[in-house]
């Protein structure tokens, strides 16, 4: 089961696996393969076709016609990685970008890690890809030198050609491909990388390689997949999480026009796996959806049907009056510092469950035949999908082929693989390829949500207006799971506070504690897990403390940061914090935004915030106008970010920051899910609104600070500071604090 379908081949060009194999077997061109070791390890690069202890992968193919084909191994979910990572290879290769063609690699262990999450795609591959491009360039130069019988030192490579400087002779890469393929591959640590000041491609603006296809409606996404003889499926799950099927009118559904089959799937009752439900398979999507409207299921809704958001709120309030059940950090003498404080500030912050709400709902196409399974999935974590299918359905991993299809948004949702295993389970029962498509209602009501949370905070100020003590009791949400034979509570992704989280390591007298509440709501990674809400809580409360101390919020933050780097503690983050980098972006954003130099009338104001998230240092200033009736308009957002020594694609980087600001504002203003009787109340975008043009910021200014640190990613870091910057600006404009999300829960009107 190693070939793509005819239609998939038409969508993506020649069969990618066949292309790679033919190249590796010595086709008319040069192919370099390497096995990606864990981050920081050396690359092992071998000559194609040579005996070696690993299976090489072809990331570069240069045809004799001069076409350079680069493989993009990471899933493309809208973050631009399909363009930016090949740019890294192309820069060191010295190729003209117009000569480059990009193909998406399928799931293959020889590629190394293939996931898109945590802003890791760039830092995990950047150095390896530089070496790969440099190795190919070195071999092409050697091929040219041997052809001309001149010293290698007299030859340079650029613009898809090698030039002999003394004679000005030139050979294109296509002309050199056959010769270069016969040369021994130099060790990765012996090739010379370019000086970054000589980069011609990296740091420039390059449009996404799929942009034209996207705007012209070409079939690119998982939902676009078509196979000969394909059937269409829908899957009905219990509206209350964890429910099981007692009975359903299966026979009546099978008799409906266009329906090929309908059946119950018992499932595993794993909240992140194959949940019980009823599958309907039909000749068209319309027939499947129409039959679903006539489906009648008798459900055993289980214990989760007793849970509600109002119940969780009441439980959190009661728990806040007790000591936290999980101690996270205790430094100094917090209680003594509070007793001696010149001023104490207390506040409670809360936020709801929210959905990923990607525009393309979950979908997967599956074809089970001859004991093997072929999958076409828009996934952020293809290996997890393969593993879940294998363990759930008893299919050997080597018999599961997974084609990575472009996703119409992910934000962490497609790190889960429930929709993939559902499609696979349905395909096992159907003798044809079948595409499972979730409706928007399915997507909202069966998401793996960002967890809600409750923070009960106290801060102490001494006589100099300095922060002398910090106390955060975090009441969070956890699912009950079985681990090593024991039943335990596991906090949701991003729903567990770290003892290393800012400002815990900065305050001499600090008490951090956590109490999990058991719930049956499935939770999963959601853009900038943890940071997306912790930044709002911490930097809003820090702003409260600064104003209570009668001090400038910027000055207060800089004093709190200090001047010394903070080393890893015992918390789960366990990473050092480069204070100098954060101070730099914070002072830079203040300068760019004219912080403190503007006089705003009542109803207008500035707010500032910063956060270290997913290896990126980001500070933001928001300027807002709030009408007397409480209508908010974000006039301007200034963002300064430090993600290392090199911006790969300036166009893509700006896009990621601007998208983070817009997504962060929409989440701040509108995103909210209610829970009643163990189910999500909201059904569609009519009652789960997203940000629209009139509410978008009038102006977003993006600035990058280059440091001498390793290159990191940008999918998450710019998201967390937006909410606190806007809320702090609202306070400056109106005197009203926002302590509950979304903003629609707070009356912003003023007189």
Image: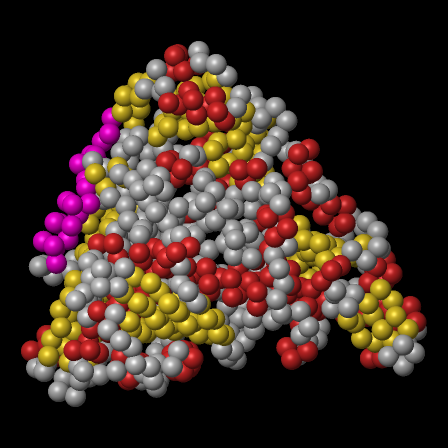
Residue 634: give x, y in percent of width and height.
35, 65
Give yes or no for residue 474 being in the magenta stretch: no
Looking at the image, residue 201 sits to the left or right of residue 460; the answer is right
Residue positioned 42% across, 34% down in the render: 439
Image quarter (top left, top right, bottom left or bottom right) of the N terminus: top right
Furthest-left residue in view? Answer: 339
What residue do we see at 66% from left, 34% from top?
7
Q: Name the residue nearer the viewer: 412 or 653.
A: 653
Q: Is residue 223 visible?
A: yes
- Where residue 487 appears, as percent x and y from the top left, is 24, 44
Considering only vertical position in the picture, is 675 above or below 573? above
Q: Split into 4 quadrants, where in the image is the C terminus? A: bottom left
- Nearest to the observer: residue 663 or residue 11: 663
Q: Which residues are magenta?
A: 300-320
Can residue 133 be seen here? The reply is no
Query: Which residue sits at x=84%, y=51%?
Result: 28
Q: What residue is at 64 percent from the left and 77 percent from the top?
A: 196
The image quadrant that residue 668 belongs to is bottom left
Could you tell whether 252 is left or right of 197 in the image? left
Question: Where does residue 626 sit, x and y in percent of width and height?
Answer: 27, 65
Q: Quadrant of residue 183?
A: bottom right
Picture coordinates of residue 239, whole percent (x, y): 29, 32
Q: How many marks?
A: 0
Q: Is residue 312 magenta?
A: yes
In the image, 362 versus 273, the foreground residue is: 362
Query: For the stretch drawn in magenta, what is the main secondary structure?
Result: helix
As displayed, is residue 363 above or below residue 369?
A: below
């Amino acid at each position: 089961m190693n070939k793509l379908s005819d239609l998939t081949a038409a969508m993506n060009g020649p069969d990618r696996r066949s292309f790679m194999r033919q190249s590796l077997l010595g086709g008319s061109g040069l192919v370099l393969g390497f096995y990606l070791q864990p981050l920081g390890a050396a690359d092992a690069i071998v000559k194609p076709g040579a005996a070696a202890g690993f299976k090489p992968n072809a990331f570069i193919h240069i045809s004799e016609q001069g076409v350079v084909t680069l493989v993009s191994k990471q899933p493309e979910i809208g973050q631009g990685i399909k363009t930016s990572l090949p740019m890294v290879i192309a820069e060191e290769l010295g190729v003209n970008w117009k000569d480059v063609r990009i193909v998406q690699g399928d799931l293959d262990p020889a590629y190394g890690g293939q996931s898109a999450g945590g802003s890791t795609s760039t830092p995990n591959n950047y150095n390896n890809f530089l070496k790969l491009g440099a190795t190919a360039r070195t071999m092409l130069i050697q091929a040219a030198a041997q052809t001309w019988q001149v010293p290698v030192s007299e030859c340079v490579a650029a613009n898809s050609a090698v030039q002999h400087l003394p004679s000005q002779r030139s050979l294109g890469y296509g002309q050199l491909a056959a010769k270069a393929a016969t040369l021994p591959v130099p060790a990765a640590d012996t090739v010379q990388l370019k000086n970054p000041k000589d980069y011609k491609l990296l740091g420039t603006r390059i449009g996404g390689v799929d942009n034209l296809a996207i705007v012209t409606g070409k079939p690119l996404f998982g939902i676009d997949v078509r196979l000969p003889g394909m059937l269409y499926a829908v899957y009905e799950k219990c509206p209350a999480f964890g429910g099981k099927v007692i009975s359903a009118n299966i026979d009546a559904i099978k008799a409906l026009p266009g329906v090929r089959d309908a059946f119950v799937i018992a499932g595993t009752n794993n909240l992140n796996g194959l949940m019980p439900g009823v599958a309907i398979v039909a000749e068209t999507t319309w027939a499947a959806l129409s039959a679903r409207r006539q489906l009648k299921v008798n459900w055993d809704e289980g214990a989760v049907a007793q849970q509600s958001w109002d119940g969780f709120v009441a439980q959190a309030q009661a728990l806040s009056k007790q000591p936290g059940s999980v101690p996270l950090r205790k430094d100094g003498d917090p209680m003594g510092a509070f007793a001696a404080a010149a001023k104490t500030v207390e506040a409670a912050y809360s936020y709801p469950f929210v959905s990923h709400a990607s525009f393309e709902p979950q979908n997967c196409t599956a074809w089970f035949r001859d004991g093997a399974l072929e999958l076409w999935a828009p996934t952020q974590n293809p290996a997890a999908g393969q593993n879940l299918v294998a363990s759930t359905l008893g299919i050997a991993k080597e018999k599961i082929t997974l084609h990575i299809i472009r996703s119409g948004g992910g934000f962490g949702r497609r790190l889960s693989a429930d929709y993939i295993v559902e499609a696979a389970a349905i395909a096992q029962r159907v003798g044809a390829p079948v595409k499972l498509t979730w409706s928007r209602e399915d997507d909202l009501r069966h998401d793996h949500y960002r967890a809600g949370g409750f923070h009960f905070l106290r801060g102490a100020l001494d006589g100099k207006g300095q922060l002398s003590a910090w106390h955060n009791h975090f009441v969070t949400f956890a699912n009950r799971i079985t681990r090593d034979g024991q039943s335990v509570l596991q906090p949701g992704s991003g729903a567990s506070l770290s003892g290393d989280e800012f400002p815990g390591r900065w305050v001499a007298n600090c008490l951090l504690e956590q109490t999990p509440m058991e719930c049956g709501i499935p939770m999963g990674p959601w853009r900038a897990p943890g940071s997306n809400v912790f930044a709002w809580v911490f930097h809003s409360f820090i702003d409260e403390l600064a104003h209570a101390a009668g001090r400038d919020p910027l000055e207060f933050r800089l004093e709190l940061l200090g001047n010394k780097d903070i080393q890893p503690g015992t918390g789960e983050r366990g990473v050092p914090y480069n204070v100098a980098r954060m101070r730099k972006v914070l002072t830079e954003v203040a300068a760019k935004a004219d912080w403190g130099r503007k006089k705003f009338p009542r109803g207008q104001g500035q707010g500032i915030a910063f956060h270290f998230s997913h290896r990126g240092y980001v500070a933001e200033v928001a300027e807002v106008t709030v009408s007397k009736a409480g209508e908010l308009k974000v006039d301007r957002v200034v963002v300064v970010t430090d993600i290392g020594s090199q911006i790969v694609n300036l166009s893509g980087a700006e896009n990621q920051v601007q998208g983070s600001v817009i997504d962060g504002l929409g989440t701040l203003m509108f995103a909210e899910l209610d829970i009643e009787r163990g189910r999500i109340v909201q059904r569609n975008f009519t009652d789960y609104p997203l940000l629209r043009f009139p509410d978008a910021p009038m102006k977003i200014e993006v600035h990058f600070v280059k440091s001498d640190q390793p290159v990191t990613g940008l999918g998450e870091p710019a998201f967390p500071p937006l909410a606190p910057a806007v809320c702090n600006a609202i306070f400056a404009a109106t005197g009203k604090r926002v302590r509950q999300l979304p903003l629609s829960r707070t009356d912003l009107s003023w007189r």
